[in-house]
């Protein structure tokens, strides 16, 4: 999109050529409205294909569904002018979405985009943006579930998926997922269905809780407004996030750690079913391995040892305590220690029974949790270790 024809070619690909009503500066209306509500702005501008101009899959397609109206060089020049207009006239933006990167662009044209972004929007993040920008990468799917071991670094912003610890570029993962279900999922349609609260809760835990940014779609209807049932579902999700994660049962902050460090936090016995770890990333991601253990109070008041890893499912069985000659009574259910690699910005660990299912694990009587750092490139710190009550996260 551009606001007016500024390139001298006379092509009718601008807002001023449309039969719209009201202001002829949609970007001004949009950015002013968002900032008045305290919301950051961004633009989606795909340089991989342009259906109207016949630029498809990174090149001009003379036999494509639309007849090309510009040469490849003209397309690049028009695109750069539109980026200049969008990035240069509407103030600082939060995110610039390239979607597909700059496939088919020459290095010279790519360098122009990089320079333009650096001069006009230096603080914006760039989804699949060019090298030397504040790039973020795609998690590789649109279902809101990032890989459990997601890393901040990767080869570049086009390296989709979980990334790798020793990647040459810091390009955090982003999980874009639609709010709607069915066929027309990224835009509004009459009779459209949308995700349940349980689905959205799971997507939050499996995106934000796996170190990714969650980008949840919005679907304005033909009036330009978000339908009220959609607004209510968004509100429900926000209410649940605040209820679950704003008041931990216990928390420790800013704890220095390194290889071999064990961080112990006492608990008060409340039934809990999840915890989070947050790494201090001010000097980069360093932690590459950790385990989690719990200490459980015995049924008869006797402290139990730290729960050790269960290597086989049948090892994770009910332990027994002698209560008399030839009589044994079950005292607790042992859950396997959780073993993980990446922590990053945030790692949410939901506790499960026997290490085999997603069955919730609200266990009462927990006396302490211990996090052991088993692998780290150098000393780091945990910004937060927090445990959350099962009742508030239900």
Image: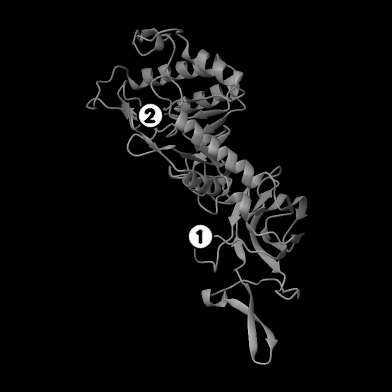
Mark 1 = which residue?
A: 358
Q: Is residue 98 visible?
A: no
Residue 295 image point, x, y percent = 71, 68
Q: Is residue 176 visible?
A: yes
Residue 47 image point, x, y percent = 41, 27
Q: Which mark is residue 111?
A: none
Q: Residues within 10 Å of mark 1 (few under 14, many from 20)?
A: few
Whether residue 308 is situated above or below residue 111 in the rendered picture: below
Residue at horizontal 40%, vertical 8%?
21
Residue 289 image point, x, y percent = 63, 60
What colour scheme does the image use? one colour
Residue 356 image point, x, y percent = 50, 66
Q: Residues within 10 Å of mark 2 (few under 14, many from 20)?
A: some
Q: Secondary structure at mark 1?
A: loop
Whether residue 273 is situated above or below residue 7 in the rendered picture: below
Seen from the viewer's position, the closer of residues 224 and 338 is 224
Q: Earlier in the sequence, mark 2 or mark 1?
A: 2
For residue 122, which quarter of the picture?
top right
Residue at horizontal 48%, vertical 19%?
83
For residue 1, which quarter of the picture?
top left
Please give left or right for residue 252 compared with residue 46 in the image.
right
Residue at horizontal 73%, vertical 76%?
300
Q: How many numbered discs?
A: 2
Mark 2 = which residue?
A: 188
Seen from the viewer's position, the closer of residues 181 and 374 is 181
Check the image and name the residue furthest to the left.
63
Please give left or right for residue 127 compared with residue 351 in the image.
left
Please give left or right for residue 255 compared with residue 222 in the image.
right
Rounded to the nearest angstrom, the CA distance separating label 2 from label 1 is: 33 Å
Seen from the viewer's position, the closer of residues 318 and 36 is 318
Q: Secondary structure at mark 2?
A: loop
């Amino acid at each position: 999109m551009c606001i007016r024809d500024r390139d001298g070619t006379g092509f009718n690909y601008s807002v001023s050529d449309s039969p719209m009503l009201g202001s002829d500066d949609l970007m001004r209306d949009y950015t002013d409205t968002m900032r008045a509500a305290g919301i950051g702005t961004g633009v989606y501008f795909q340089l991989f294909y342009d259906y109207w101009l016949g630029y498809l899959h990174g090149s001009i397609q003379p036999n494509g569904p639309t007849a090309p109206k510009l040469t490849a060089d003209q397309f690049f020049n028009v695109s750069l002018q539109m980026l200049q207009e969008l990035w240069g006239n509407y103030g600082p933006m939060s995110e610039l979405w390239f979607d597909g990167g700059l496939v088919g662009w020459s290095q010279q044209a790519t360098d122009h985009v990089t320079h333009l972004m650096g001069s006009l929007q230096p603080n914006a993040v760039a989804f699949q943006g060019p090298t030397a920008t504040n790039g973020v990468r795609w998690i590789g799917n649109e279902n809101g579930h990032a890989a459990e071991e997601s890393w901040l670094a990767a080869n570049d912003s086009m390296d989709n998926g979980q990334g790798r610890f020793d990647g040459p570029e810091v390009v955090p993962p982003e999980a874009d997922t639609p709010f709607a279900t069915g066929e027309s999922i990224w835009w509004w349609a009459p009779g459209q269905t949308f995700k349940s609260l349980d689905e959205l809760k799971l997507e939050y835990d499996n995106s934000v809780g796996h170190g990714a940014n969650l980008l949840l779609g919005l679907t304005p209807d033909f009036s330009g407004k978000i339908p009220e049932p959609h607004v209510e579902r968004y509100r429900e999700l926000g209410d649940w996030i605040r209820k679950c994660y704003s008041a931990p049962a216990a928390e420790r902050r800013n704890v220095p750690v390194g290889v071999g460090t064990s961080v112990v936090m006492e608990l008060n016995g409340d039934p809990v079913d999840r915890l989070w770890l947050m790494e201090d990333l001010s000097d980069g991601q360093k932690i590459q391995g950790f385990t989690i253990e719990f200490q459980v109070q015995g049924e008869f008041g006797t402290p139990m040892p730290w729960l050790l890893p269960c290597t086989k499912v049948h090892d994770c069985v009910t332990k027994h305590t002698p209560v008399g000659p030839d009589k044994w009574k079950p005292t607790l259910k042992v859950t396997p220690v959780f073993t993980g690699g990446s922590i990053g910005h945030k790692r949410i660990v939901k506790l499960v029974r026997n290490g085999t299912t997603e069955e919730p694990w609200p266990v009462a009587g927990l006396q302490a949790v211990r996090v052991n750092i088993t692998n780290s490139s150098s000393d780091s710190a945990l910004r937060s270790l927090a445990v959350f009550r099962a009742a508030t996260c239900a």
